Amino acid sequence: MTAIPAPPPPGARRPGIPLGRLAGAPVHLQPSALLFAGLVALAYRPVVAAGHTTAAAYLIALVFVVLLFASVLLHELGHALVARRYGIGVRGITLELLGGYTELDRPAPRPGVDLAVAAAGPLVSLTLGGAGAALAAAVPGDGIVNTLLTQLAVSNLVVGLFNSLPGLPLDGGRVLAAAVWRFTGDRGRGVVAAGWVGRGVALVTAVTALLLFQLGFQSLFGLAFALLLVVTLWQGAGAAVRAVRGARAAAPGLAALAAPLAGVPAGTPLARAQDQLAASPRPDAVLAVLDPQDRVVAVVDDAAAAAVPPAHRGEVDVATVARALSTVPALPVTAAVADLREILESNPAALYLVTSGEDVCGVLRAAVLTDWLESQRK
């Protein structure tokens, strides 16, 4: 089992069975997870059948399934707790057919935050796998307890390692996307790159599963599960790539013209912030001020920053030449040219946030927007 499904868009949560709350987040169970639990119990029963009645073997298999779902829940809790550490709210955790997903209330503000949230899940699974292996080694003999601990150790290690592969929708794919975002300054480029790698991971998984089946190392049930996993991987990777391309196709000029945000903590001297920006991969980015939870709270006004004499920029807090995010007008990335002209005329400003839902895609300077709108008249 692996926690790979991509969460649905905000507000489109699929219905499920409520299981209560964990660390303040609602937990739901999809009906498909119950089907999978039954299949796993059927496949696991032969492992513990020797020396037990049929009823006892099924009971032990059911205990294994419950522990397996608890492991997946802890995996998702790892994502949720790290997200909250950076001030990102958690809408809920859902367990479903092939694992689970954690739905956050907004995207990560910086690549480093996205990477930390993504890496938390596999780290939890690998830790559980290591702990299970240590406990299995400490339990003498090959009884039921030892068998359960060994199987849980193996399953968590497989989940942790497989989820670390660098392709979406796996957690490792989110890590790769964050790394590309960090080095290019373009979140969408990172998602597209990780999506294509994810398709490669799906193909390699399919070939490997078929080869293991042909060699007799995998059962028919294992092959069916692997191919279902392949389909899920392929669909998730494709959905990620299409989402980015769709957003850019809706307003190609805006997507191309928007400058990314370069976040610095509040209290950073203006001179240091400008030096960091000049040395970054995207020196055209707009400086943003981050609060202690790494949330963007303001963007630097170019004119206000330029008005500070160079000799004094080492003493001026970058926040003093910034505008609160709530005061910066927003331009939806899907806005039509006519709508953009209306917004520019009715709400003139030096900077505009380019948004896609709750995500801030970048910042557009008024002069750049004006020139681009003029080009659309030709």
Image (cartoon, rainbow, N blue to C red):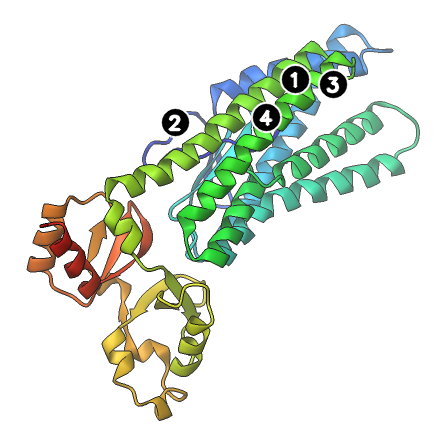
Q: Is residue 44 left or right of residue 309?
A: right
Residue at image mark 4:
203
Residue 372, x across and y down, in percent? 18, 56
Q: Which residue is mark 1?
A: 40
Residue drawn at the location 62% of the way across and 39% of the way down = 165
The residue positioned 15% from the left and 44% from the top of the image is 336
Q: Nearer the viewer, mark 4 or mark 1?
A: 4
Q: Which amino acid does the dot numbered 2 rest on?
A: Arg
Q: Secondary structure at mark 4?
A: helix
Whether residues under marks 1 and 2 lie with C-beta atoms below 8 angstroms apart, the answer is: no
Query: Which amino acid, mark 1?
Result: Val
Picture coordinates of residue 139, whole percent (x, y): 88, 34
- The residue that label 2 is drawn on is 14
> N-terminal of the two: label 3 or label 2?
2
Marks 3, 2: nearer the viewer: 3
Q: Quick one: which residue is furthest to the bottom in this view?
A: 311
Mark 4 and mark 1 lie on one chain; the one further toward the N terminus is 1
Point out the frontmost of discs 3 and 4: 4
Q: Which residue is mark 3?
A: 212
For residue 361, the mark is: none
The vertical placement of 120 against 40, above or below, is below
Query: What residue is rendered at 47% in x and 26% in y?
Result: 235
Q: CA distance from mark 4 to mark 1?
A: 24 Å
Q: Nearer the viewer, residue 286 or 13?
A: 286
